[in-house]
Image (spheres, rainbow, N blue to C red):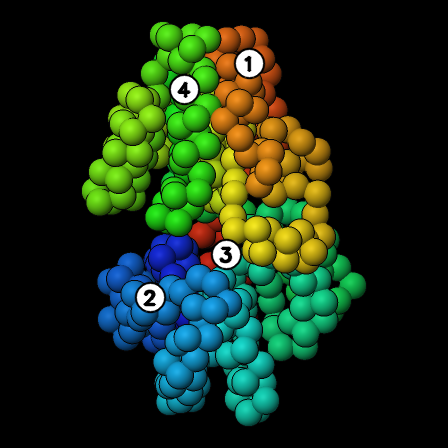
Amino acid sequence: MAQKIFIVAGEASGDAHGAGLMAAMLACDPELTFAGLGGAAMNGIAGEVRNWTADAAVVGFWEVIKKYGYFRKEFEKAVQALEDFSPDVLVLVDYPGFNLRLAAEIRKRGIEVKIIQYISPQVWAWKRGRIVRMAKILDRMLCLFPFEVDLYRGSGLDARFVGHPIAEQLSRLRDSEGRDEKLVALLPGSRQREVEKIFPVMLDAAVEMSKIDPGLCFASAAPEDELAQKMEAMASERGVDCKVGVGNAHGLMAGACCAAVASGTATLEAAFLGLPYCIVYKVAWPTYYLARALMAVDYLGMANLLAGREVVREFLQANAVGSSVAAELLRLSGDSKQRGLLASELVEVTAPLADPRAYELAATATLEEVI
């Protein structure tokens, strides 16, 4: 009898990881059947996985509250769909606000199913008290970073390091040697609100850098045309010649001599590709104060968290000013030895993530629960 997997992801990155995991599980056992919630990628692998990410990918406490009625209905529909499908394993891909509540409800109703969380919530940065709760409702945690496993030690929750899919996505660019010594990448993030806050700081830095080294050139990346046009207009207003491509962030990371990068996934990608960079990040002040009160770590960048020290400079909030960012980027762009040292450190720090079998390892750890 074919084993059944119910899988839930709630936004674009989770959909991509969910699809990668599903494909790897099918490679191990082509007879598996899937149902659940995800996005276009997951739906493309199994049509029974309903595409809901366009509505479910909501960021921010207030935004979630405004859509409470929608999420309440979707929650009940998910529980009912799971009961009807009667799976052997429930796989929860990231999206902890919804997924951990779903796991708790499944346990409360006494539904017999193994529950696996793929991608650990950032308990190391925010709410470590969640670990006790997760140990009661989950059977296994699949971690992307090796240090996360230690956080669950002693909790009773079976935590496994399965590797980060970044290697499968970027390994072909990791050993690139075609860096342009005069090209500086300005990568302010993919959301409009991030761009509005962070790109001006990066452009101010570009203005300062051009005064010192007029031979430098600048480039950026956006996820879609409309934002790219807005960024080009912002650069033009400040007199910065900055080409903004669409969907070319990884190429820039592989080809620039150095970069300013907004905090987020891009900082890990830049580190993995050995790009010398600094982190720039600004948010609304209330959000910043709340984050600082809740954070349990000393750094924002994943490379620094992995290293346990500041490998790359972090310019956050009040310190995120053009002159400071310019000074750091000029240090890197003007000294090939410093760039080489930082690039080597970044490659070393991300070495545990370089195994290109992350989805395969996650699939194996998942299917152990149904054998």
What residue does disc 4 label? 207
Q: Which residue lies under the disc numbered 3?
A: 362
Marks 4 and 1 sit apart, C-alpha to C-alpha, by 15 Å
Question: Circles 3 and 1: CB distance less than 8 Å?
Answer: no
**Which label number is shown at residue 14?**
none
Nearer mark to the viewer, of 2 and 1: 1
Q: CA distance from mark 2 to mark 4?
A: 39 Å
User: Within 10 angstroms of label 1, few (less than 14), some, or many (20 or more) residues?
Assistant: some
In the image, is 339 to the left or to the right of 199? Answer: right
Q: Specify the farthest residue to the bottom.
A: 109
Asked whether the residues under the numbered discs 2 and 1 touch, taking CB atoms below 8 Å apart as contact, a structural biologist would say no
Name the secondary structure under disc 1. helix
Report the amino acid beneath label 4: Val
Mark 2 element type: helix
Comes first in the chain, label 4 or label 3? 4
Lower sequence index among marks 3 and 1: 1
Q: Which quadrant of the structure image shows residue 234?
A: top left
Between 252 and 20, the one lying in front of the other is 252
Which amino acid, by three-letter code, is at mark 2? Thr
Decide which of 27, 102 is in the foreground and name it. Answer: 102
Indicate which disc residue 331 carries.
Answer: 1
Residue of label 2:
53
Residue visible at 22% across and 38% down in the picture: 229
Which mark is first along the chain, 1 or 2? 2
Of marks 2 and 3, the one in the foreground? 2
Image coordinates for residue 233, horizontal then vertical, percent: 25, 34
Query: Does the rendering let one see residue 224?
Result: yes
| Cα distance in 3D space between marks 3 and 1 | 41 Å
Q: CA distance from mark 2 to mark 3?
A: 22 Å
